[in-house]
Image (tube, grey):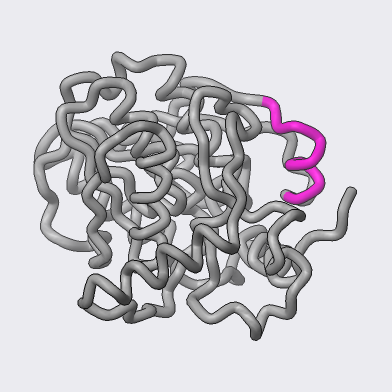
Amino acid sequence: MIPRLKWVSLVVSRCHATVGEGCGRRAGVRLSTGSSRSSDEEVKKFIIENTEVVRGPHNTPNISLRLFTPSCRFWFARPELWPFSEPYWAIYWPGGQALTRYLLDEPAVARDRRVLDLGSGCGASAIAAKLGGASYVLANDIDPVAAIAIKLNCELNGLEPIPVETEDLIGSEAERWDLILLGDMFYEEQLASSLHSWLRECVRAHGTQVLIGDPGRAQLQSHGIRKRLRRLAAYELPPSLREENYGLTASTVWLYQPET
């Protein structure tokens, strides 16, 4: 296996931490890209120059994404050389892969529905929902660089830019969503508890359907929310992803069914 970027290894290891540890909120350090168009254009140019278009990555052959690969100059760079928040959006996490694959295989799940992709990252699940015929899709990621990356990935897949909300929606007043998607969001115990509480309120208030993609991280398996999940599908991880995710072999899509 080609040695990975030093701090990509660090990011992955942080999100594989045992219960009680963790990396904090994903992309928790806010980057102000500025309100001017030129600032966004500079970030867009930087992303294009420092990522590679991957067509049909891993379990999702129908979409293309801008991701970090060994061909990218930052793959082997020292972490301090990266100028923004940690680029979670440049890694195609296995939970997000499973969720995206499920939406591609079962487009009726999103068709004609209002969909929120929480912790959207590269935007793959939001893109799959849109390709499946969702009436409206909102991607939510608190990293403004991720917001620009999501728009670039929409262009790669022949879609108009999906709107992106960079405010933290967890704990906010529950809006009316038909479907909420979460891929690889359960990497910290406190965050898992906050998600459980907020998602439960969304379901109670509006009958929202919640789908969770996760490769078996300890923070989900040991949390009380695990008892409220029903397995819908599971996908084997390719050997390279198993290595990168510390031996996890499959990623599962769960339906969240909170207590009434």
Residue 243 belongs to the span the image colors magenta = yes
Residue 145 pos. (x, y %): 40, 66
* Residue 257, quarter of the rendered image: top left
Which residue range is magenta in the image? 236-244
215 with respect to 64 (left or right): right
Residue 99 to residue 24: above or below: above
Instruction: Tell which of 30 and 229 is nearer to you.
Output: 30
Q: Write the residue at 18% across / 48% down.
A: 201
Count of numbered circles in the view: 0
- Residue 109 in the image: x percent, y percent? 30, 20
Q: Is residue 10 visible?
A: yes
Q: Main secondary structure of the magenta part?
A: helix
Q: Is residue 33 magenta?
A: no
In the rendered image, the vertical position of residue 252 relative to residue 132, given as above or below = below
Q: Residue at x 34, y 55 (%)?
A: 195
Identify the residue at image location x=68%, y=64%: 8
Q: Which image quarter: residue 168?
A: bottom left
Residue 176 vertical placement versus 9 (above, below) = above
* Residue 132 falls left or right of residue 68: left
Rendered residue at 36%/41% (across/down) = 154
Asked if residue 228 shows in the view, the reply is no
- Quadrant of the drawing holding the C terminus: top left
